[in-house]
Image (spheres, rainbow, N blue to C red):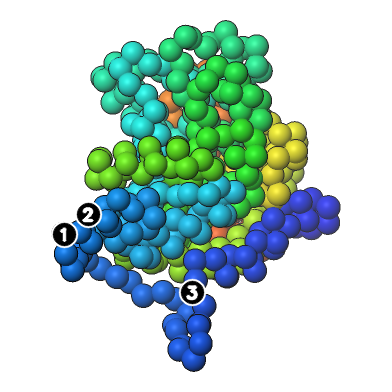
Amino acid sequence: MQVPEALMESVVRGWRDLSTRLVQIGRDRPEGAAGIFVNPPVTRGSTVLFSSLEAMDAAGQRRYDDELIYGAMGTPVQHRLEQAIAELDGGRYGQIVPSGLAACALPFLAYVSAGDHCLLSDSVYGPTRRFADRVLRRFGVEVTYFPPLADEDELRALVRPTTRLIYAESPGSHSFEVQDIPMLGRLAASIGARLVVDNTWGIGLFDPFAAGAHVSVQALTKYPAGHSDTIIGAVSVASEQDWRLLRDTAIQAGQTAGPDDCWLTLRGLHTMGVRQERQAATAIAVALWLHERPEVRRVLHPALPSCPGHENWKRDFKGASSLFGVVFDPAFDAADMAAMIDSLTLFGIGASWGGYESLVLPTTGSISRSCRSVTQDGPACRFHIGLEAGDALLADLEQGLGRMAASRDGRAGA
């Protein structure tokens, strides 16, 4: 399908602009006559040996300076990846952790205590919500979920004297609301709370710190690693004070990643720009094609006006990623959508996203919400577009929608 030139440019320009930078970050340069490998080596180890007790003590005092102290406190390739992600996110410091969920949980562990209150966007990643409901509440932390597109007055009505943290995910990973992060930043500053933004969809495309965030969360499992073979996460910050607290909390909680996962992610990061330029271009073409289909009620792609918060995307983002949602006409039901999904041959059925392969996942009946979501307007699913040829994906979707219509017609005739 032909995509208007201006729309395509708005979607891919950020990835194109990033490509050169992504090739360069996290790498060493030759010095003098000595040659080096393009990719840094993987250093595996637990025990670090020192020449004296004095040297060991001095290293411990420099634990915020990428010093080698003990394997669980960081390795050379971990430190390179931390620097690269922080730079990419617009921050100054980073902490690598063993999963995206570990990254989501770390700011709560660092900033809140029993008796504190947190405001969370209702569209947050499901495991983040479960952590808040099952762990934070058990430890005496109160949680309130707010509508992702609530205005400042609505949010101020939810603020308590004990509100210490505001947590946003933009776009939401199932319903794709693009939040007004600058407004949340102003609110957080006015009440002395920390603003945490899950920026996994917008890595490299949105600067959360310029918008007033204190912490950016990344599931590096997704686009940076890019090959569906690594579980890893990161938090980035702009303030050294925030970084020291988060780093100490990660170490105290045993939340550090292994060197092999760090190395795989750093390697994937170098090709993320070209992968995502291609995948984002195919995704917007598929999204527009679906937008024109009679079976579809709404396409939840942030670059399209049909997506809640589209104006925030236009204002704040430098491009778009390859994950979006679809809400089908309510004349169809979940069983009809399942018939479509089961018939697809090029879309894997599975959780996660951000790899090189296309995926589909139902969102109807599988997400918890406190506020009403557009995904309740009809059967809904999420598509991640990979590196397959766009025409092949459209042909697969064409036959899949045919199966969905046949399922509906079969029910009507029964």
Q: CA distance from mark 2 to mark 1?
A: 6 Å
Relative depth, front residue between 184 and 91: 91
Looking at the rendered image, the disc whose residue lies closer to the viewer, 3 or 1, is 1
Under circle 3, the secondary element is loop
Residue denoted by label 2? 57
Residue denoted by label 1? 53
Task: Name, please, the residue furthest toward the bottom.
Answer: 33
Amino acid at dot 1:
Leu
Q: Earlier in the sequence, mark 3 or mark 1?
A: 3
Q: Quadrant of residue 55?
A: bottom left
Amino acid at dot 3:
Asp
- In the rendering, at what x and y percent does residue 124 appear? 48, 31
- In the rendering, at what x and y percent does residue 42 appear? 33, 71
Residue denoted by label 3? 28
Please determine whether, in this image, residue 3 is positioned above or below residue 216: below
Q: Is residue 9 visible?
A: yes
Q: Is residue 232 visible?
A: no
Q: Are marks 2 and 1 in contact (CB under 8 Å)?
A: yes
Amino acid at dot 2:
Asp
Q: Earlier in the sequence, mark 2 or mark 3?
A: 3
Q: Quadrant of the N terminus?
A: bottom right
Residue shown at 29% from the left, 70% from the top: 43
